[in-house]
Amino acid sequence: VEHPFKVAPRRPEIVPGARGLDRLKRRTRREQRFIERRDEIARAFRQPLQELRFEDLRAREDDGSLDTRSLAHEFNVLVDRQVAFQRTQANGLRLHELTATIEQGIRLAANTHEALEVICNALAEGLGADRVFAYTHDVNEEPVLTAQWHLPDLPPLGDLPDELVDGLGTLADELWQSASFLVSHERPAPEAQLERSKMFYRYTDAQAGIAVPIGIGDQAIGMVFVVMVQAPRDWEEFEIVTVQRVATFVARSIVEDIYRAQQSEHIDRLIRLD
């Protein structure tokens, strides 16, 4: 019986001869030269575009007809919005990267004092500050743990003066209870400073700074200070938010330390009872 399906015979492979191989090689070289030239032209156009910033794309609003000037103004408004949007995106990325790095460093810290050292070093580097210091205090508002970082050409801060300890304890409580912080873009005139502010500026020689409380529950237990000594500074919102988040990380670390200490004490009691 004849099979209903017929298999088509296999077509013989075409093997190019010497001339065919030469033509194939020449075509391959032409295509390669075309690709290289195309990439070269693309790089020539791409480089200036990569270096071009939105800040440079501004139209003249003082030239041309009224319609032209109006159109230039609208264009510049769009450019300003795009620049602000890009800056916000960049700041948000910096905030995320910096806080993630600090949070990881705090988790790896062996104790609260090491955690304070981590945040001082990381905030100084991440925010470009001249000086960063942090401390925690006990129920009597006496400093228990302190840490600091400063530029090599600045002297380290000594022990907190007694009169400044009282002022900072009160300030920390006020800020924590009101869920707020202090930001100074420049050093105010002496006549405009409160007494505790005068002591703080004398102690740190600050020209600008951010002060954020560290708290647990309804009680402030310390402060974080980011300070500029060499010149005033306009602090960005993301920089303030960064210090606030870091203070929260420290508080959480302290709570975990307290829990581990209580757990260890409980285990020791059980062992003694046995």
Image (cartoon, rainbow, N blue to C red):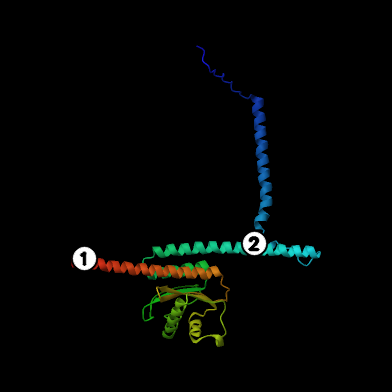
- Position of residue 150 in the picture relative to residue 86 (left or right): left
Q: Quadrant of residue 32?
A: top right
Q: Quadrant of residue 263?
A: bottom left
**Mark 1 residue type:** Ile
Question: What label sits on residue 82 in the rendered view?
Answer: 2
Name above or below for residue 60 compared with residue 206. Answer: above
Residue 245 lies, in percent from the top left, at 47, 68
Query: 263 or 100, which is in the foreground?
Result: 263
- Position of residue 94 in the picture relative to residue 78 (left or right): left
Crowding at dot 2, Cα within 10 Å, few <14 / some 14-19 / many 20+, comes out as: some
Question: What label sits on residue 237 in the rendered view?
Answer: none
Query: 137 or 161, which is in the foreground?
Result: 137
Residue 232 lies, in percent from the top left, at 57, 76
Of all residues, the one furthest to the bottom in this rendering is 191
* Residue under the image location 49 percent in, 64 percent down: 98
Of callouts 1 and 2, the N-terminal one: 2
- Element marked by disc 1: helix
The answer to whether any part of residue 34 appears in the image is yes
Question: What label sits on residue 271 in the rendered view?
Answer: 1
- Element marked by disc 2: helix
Name above or below for residue 111 compared with residue 167. Answer: above
